[in-house]
Image (cartoon, rainbow, N blue to C red):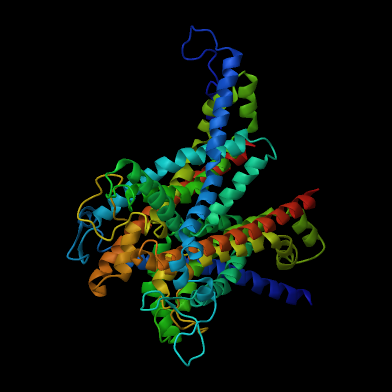
Amino acid sequence: MTVRRRKAVGGALALLTGAAAFLVVAMLGVILWDVVRGGAARVSWEFLTAAPQEGMTGGGIFPAIYGTAVMTLLMTVAVLPVGVATAIYLHEYAPPRSRLAGAVRVAVTNLAGVPSIVFGLFGLGFFIQFVGRGLDRALSEPGTLHYGQPALIWASLTLAVLTLPVVIVSTEEALRAVPRELRDASLALGATQSQTLARVVLPGALPGILTGAILAVARGAGEVAPILFTGVAYFLPDLPGSPFSQFMHLGYHVYVLATQSPDVEATRPLLYATVLVLLALTFALNLVAIAIRTRTRRRAAAGH
Amino acid sequence: MAESASVPAIAPLRRGEDRPLPSIRRRQLREAAIRGVITLIALTGIAAVVLIFVFVAREALPLLTDPEVRGEASFGKLFLPQVLRPNRPPGFMWQPVSGVPKYSMIPLFVGTLKVTAVSMLVSVPVGIAAALFASEFAPPRLREVLKPVIELLAGIPSVVLGFFALMVMATWLQSAFGFSFRLNAVVAGLGLALTVIPVIFTVSEDALQAVPRAYREASLALGATRWETAFRVVLPAAAPGVLAGVVLGFGRSIGETMIVLMASGNAAITSWSLGDSVRTLPATIAAEMGEVVFGGAHYSVLFFIGVELFLFTFVLNALAAGFVKRLVRRMSGGKA
C-alpha cells in the first residue's frame, strides 16, 4: 500500500470509531431530550407532593417518591457496613495471596453478574418464604401472616445484596488510594492496626466510600426486577407505616404506567413526568459520584 | 491526602487519660477480635452467592421430588417436543395457564437467543469501536468527557430504557422497517444494546489502556501509522480483555429483565423471524410470578428458569475472569 492509501484507510477507520462513540453519546442525548421534552411541562410542586388520583390518570407521585426514598435508606443502612467491612478485609487484613480473599473476590464478581430478576427470586425464596415464614411460625399467632409476605424490609434487603459489589469495589479503590506511607508511619508510631484503620486510613478513604454509597443508592433506586415480588405495590392509599408494609416505587410506577394503563393517552404526560423525576434522581446521584471519584483519583495520582 | 496526614495519628493515652496504657496482651486480644469480626463479615459475599443458588434451587426442587409437580412438568415436557394436538407432529409450547398447562422451555430459549443476538450484533462493534476511539484516537480532553458520559448511560435505570424502547424506539423502527408487530425482537434487542454497550465499552477500554506504551512506541517507530498500531498491535494485545467485555455484555443481555419485559411483546412463539413478538426467560419470570399458585408446578418451573439464568451467568463470569487473568499475565509479561 502506498503511504497515501494507508493514511486514507487510517483516517476512515479512525472516523468510524469516532462515529461509534458519537452514536452512543447521541443516544444518551436523544433519551434525555425526549424525556425532558415530554415530562418537563407536567412536573410541578403539586405533582411531586400529591398522591395518584382518578385511576392513575391524575394527581402526583408522592407515595412512589417516599417509598423509593425509604427503601433505599434501609438498603444503604444494611449494605454500607457489610460492604465497607468486606473491602477492609480484602485490602487491609487479608494476607497476600490469601485463599479466602480470593474466594471472596470470586464471589463478589459473580454476585455482580447475577441477573437482577434472580435476586427477585432469591428475595422471595429466602427473605419471604424462609426468614419471614420462619418468623411467623415463631412469633405470630398461628394461621396469620405478618412477616412472611412482600414488604419494604424484604425489598430493601434484597437490594442490599444486589448492591453489595458496588460498595465493595468502590471502597477497595478508595483504600488503595491511601498511600502506604501513611499506614507505615502510623504503625511505626506504635498504633495498632485497628487504630491506624480508624484514624488514618478510613478518614483518607471517606470520599471513595461515599462514592460507593451514592452509586449503590443510584443503582438501588432504579432497579425494578428485584422488588417485583418482594414488596412493591401497584397502588396504595396510605404511605407505608412500618418496614413490614408494602410500598410504591418510582421505577415500578413507570412500568405500571407504561404497560398497564387502561387509557394510554391520558397517562402519557404523567408517565413522562415520572420518568423525568426518576432519571433526574439517578443522574444527579451518578454525577455527584463521578465528580467525587474524578477528584479523588486526581489527588491520588498527584500523591504518588 | 495532606489533611489526613496532619491529623494526629494516635493519641499517646487512650480516652481515660490518666489510666495506664492497656497491657500489650489486652491490645493483642482486641486486635484479634476486630480482625475476626471483619473477616467474618467478609464472608457475607460468599454466603450471598451460595444462598442465592440454594434458595432459588430449593423452590425449584419439587420438579424432582414432588410426583404431582413432576406429572405436570417433567424434564421431558420442559425440553422435548410434545404432542400438542392429535394427528399433528409434536412441537414446543409455553402455555402455563390453560386446561393442560404446557411448559416447554424451547420457545423461551429461542426468544432469549433472538433478542440477545440482535443486541450483541449492535453492541459488540459499537462498544469496541467506541472504546478504541476513546483509548487510541480521541484527544485526552475528549476522552475525559466521553468516559463519564458513557458511565451516565450505564447509570440509567433499565426501566427507563424499557420505557424509551417501548414508547419511542418501537415507533421509529416500525415506520422504518414496517414490522407487523410493533413490539418485537429487534426493538427489544436494540433497547438491550443501550445497557450492553456501556459494559463492553468500559471493560474493553480498561483492557486497551492496560497495553504498555512500549508496544505503541515500538510499532510507531517501525513506521506503522496510528491506525495500524491501534488495530494490529494494541487491539490484538488487549484481545482477552475485550473478549471478557463481550462475554460480560452477553451475560448482561441474557439476564436483563425490564427492557425486554416492556419492549418485546411477550408472546412465547417459536419462530426465527426477528419481526415477531418474543418472550425471554427473565421476562417470563417477571410477568408470571405475580399470578402463580405458591408451590405449584408453574411456580417451580419459574424458579427453575431462575436456576438456569444463575448457572448461565455463573459460567459466563468464570469465562470472563479467565480472559482477564490471561490479559493480566500477558501484560505483566510485556513489561518485564
Seen from the viewer's position, the closer of residues A275 and A33 is A275
Tell me: residue B58, above or below residue A17: above
Of residues B275 and A20, which is closer to you in this image?
Answer: B275
Left or right: residue A76 compared with residue A204: left
- Residue B68: image location, x then y, percent: 43, 68
Whether residue A201 is visible here, answered yes or no, is no
Tell me which corner region of the image, top left, top right, bottom left or bottom right, holds residue A177: top right
- The quarter of the rendered structure image containing the N terminus of chain A is bottom right
Left/right placement of residue B194 relative to residue B216 reads left
Q: Which residue is most to the bottom?
A: B87
Query: Residue drawn 22% across and 65% down?
Result: A56
Going by the image, does B117 lie left or right of B175? right
Q: Residue at x 51, y 53 (%)?
A: B54
Q: How many marks?
A: 0
Locate the C terminus of chain A and report the quarter of the image it occupies.
top right
**In this view, which residue lies farthest toward the right?**
B222
Image quadrant in which you'd find residue B289: bottom left
Residue found at x 77% / y 57%: B215
Q: Position of residue B327 (x, y in %)?
A: 71, 56
Residue A245: x and y in percent read 28, 49
Residue B308 visible: yes
- Please, which residue is most extreme toward the left here? A54
